[in-house]
Image (cartoon, rainbow, N blue to C red):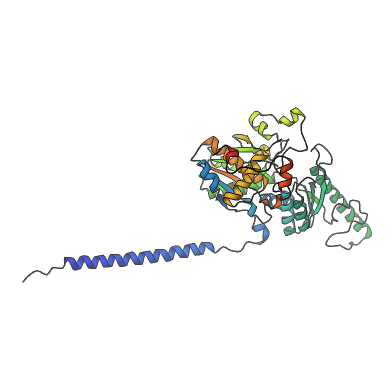
């Protein structure tokens, strides 16, 4: 009997089974993967505005990355509920003050601010049942005052003077907190003398003597946020922003760069990152007229404007807002820096327009300066490095100055660049 030839049939059968298994495995994997992706998108609602602060995206800034050969990443702090990185500080300051008893429930938080911190405090304070009183220099962009008033804060605009002057906006804010505490103590004393509680007005005892018409009526005293010296500022970034950057990059970060106003961001982030890996280089980018660049590089607070007697205004000669300073704050002294770079107003203006045109990023003045710093660091380190910076806020708060053609023309800052030639990149 002739042998039966079964080899072809067996091979065909085996192939069919293999293909069937492959198809089954594919659909099983696809379904599982789809299910996993879908479940990851299902995030629980956050608990109010406070819980929405932080955990901001870290994005690749494509145009700068491609131009430098480095991965330049920006932390999108403008996506916080109050629109800036200062939301983190406001939250930490108020939480710690309530916990310590320095701020009473229903009290008023006072602050001297060029805008962003004040807006964040005015955003966060109501979530804790508190009010906000802000003292702001009158040369700050007018839209910041408008936003503050819309948020329900009391706004005092004052002329810019030296920090050593009693009427510097920070010093006035400190006084307002003391005055609020004195009024609260007086109201409490009157209530005790009368033998009964006084009728509240809008939740607070009215200030019948009108000793300070510029301050809201208070029932539970005041608390000066003191963003420059209060180390809650540093802790907000050491415990929040820094760890987020480390996690979002999987620890693959070579450098961090940011400008400093209070110093809290650059100090908190640099300290955390260098504790995780001493190999990470951290840098400062400093605007015109600020003394921090020379402090970091030479150990002395010094600016050319001071030496030549050309200082135009206080605290520094720059159109960027919220960065640059001529004194050392407790927050800045916590920073772990490997070096510093200087940026100009023209570079910041040109950078903002370049990023808007090429990346769709509408950034504020300090964010633009941070990106100038990122390119400076990229050029110093060379291609192949990962550099992180902070995108502090968007351009909506800078329309009347940083994005106003007439204002820029007065200072010879009209943007003219077509690419990154202003950073010596062709």
Horizontal side of 375 relative to 288 (left or right) equals left
* Residue situated in front as seen by the camera: 340 or 287: 287
Percent position of residue 41, x then y: 53, 62
Horizontal side of 170 relative to 363 (left or right) equals right
Percent position of residue 229, x then y: 73, 42
Which corner quadrant of the image does residue 14 belong to? bottom left
Percent position of residue 264, x then y: 67, 43
Q: Quadrant of the N terminus?
A: bottom left
Residue drawn at 28 percent across, 64 percent down: 18
* Residue situated in front as seen by the camera: 193 or 390: 390
Q: Residue furthest bottom?
A: 1
Note whether residue 68 is visible: yes
Residue drawn at 52 percent across, 42 percent down: 67
Note whether residue 268 is visible: no
Q: Which residue lies furthest to the left in this view?
A: 1
Residue drawn at 73 percent across, 40 percent down: 411
Residue drawn at 59 percent across, 50 percent down: 357
Percent position of residue 236, x then y: 65, 48
């Amino acid at each position: 009997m002739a042998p039966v030839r079964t080899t072809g049939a067996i091979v065909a059968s085996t192939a069919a089974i293999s293909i069937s298994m492959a198809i089954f495995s594919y659909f099983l994997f696809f379904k599982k993967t789809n299910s996993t992706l879908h479940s990851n998108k299902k995030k629980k609602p956050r608990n109010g505005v406070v819980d929405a602060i932080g955990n901001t995206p870290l994005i690749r800034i494509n145009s700068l990355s491609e131009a430098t050969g480095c991965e330049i990443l920006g932390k999108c702090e403008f996506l916080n509920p109050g629109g800036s990185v200062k939301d983190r500080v406001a939250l930490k300051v108020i939480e710690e003050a309530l916990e310590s008893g320095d701020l009473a429930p229903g009290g008023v938080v006072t602050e001297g601010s060029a805008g962003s911190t004040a807006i964040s405090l005015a955003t966060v304070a109501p979530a804790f049942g508190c009010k906000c009183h802000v003292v702001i220099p009158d040369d700050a962009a007018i839209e910041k005052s408008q936003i503050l008033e819309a948020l329900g804060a009391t706004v005092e605009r004052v002329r810019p003077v030296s920090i050593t002057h009693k009427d510097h906006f920070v010093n006035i804010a400190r006084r307002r907190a003391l005055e609020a505490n004195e009024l609260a103590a007086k109201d409490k004393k009157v209530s005790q003398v009368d033998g009964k509680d006084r009728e509240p007005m809008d939740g607070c005892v009215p200030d019948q003597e009108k000793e300070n018409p510029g301050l809201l009526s208070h029932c539970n005293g005041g608390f000066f946020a003191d963003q420059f010296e209060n180390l809650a500022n540093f802790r907000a970034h050491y415990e929040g922003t820094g760890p987020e950057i480390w996690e979002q990059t999987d620890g693959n970060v070579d450098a961090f760069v940011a400008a400093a106003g209070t110093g809290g961001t650059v100090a908190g982030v640099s300290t955390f990152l260098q504790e995780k890996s001493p190999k990470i280089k951290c840098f400062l980018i400093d605007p015109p007229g600020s003394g921090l660049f020379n402090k970091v590089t030479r150990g002395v607070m010094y600016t050319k404007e001071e030496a030549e007697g050309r200082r135009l205004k206080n605290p520094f000669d720059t159109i960027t807002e919220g960065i640059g300073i001529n004194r050392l704050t407790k927050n800045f002294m916590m920073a772990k820096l490997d070096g510093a770079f200087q940026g100009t107003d023209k570079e910041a203006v040109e950078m903002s327009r370049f990023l808007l045109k090429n990346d769709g990023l509408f950034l504020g003045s300090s964010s633009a300066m941070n990106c100038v710093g990122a390119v400076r660091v990229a050029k110093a380190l060379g291609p192949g490095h990962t550099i992180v910076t902070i995108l502090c806020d968007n351009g909506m708060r800078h329309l009347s100055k940083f994005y106003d053609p007439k204002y820029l023309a007065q200072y010879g800052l009209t943007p003219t660049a077509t690419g990154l030639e202003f950073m010596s990149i062709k």
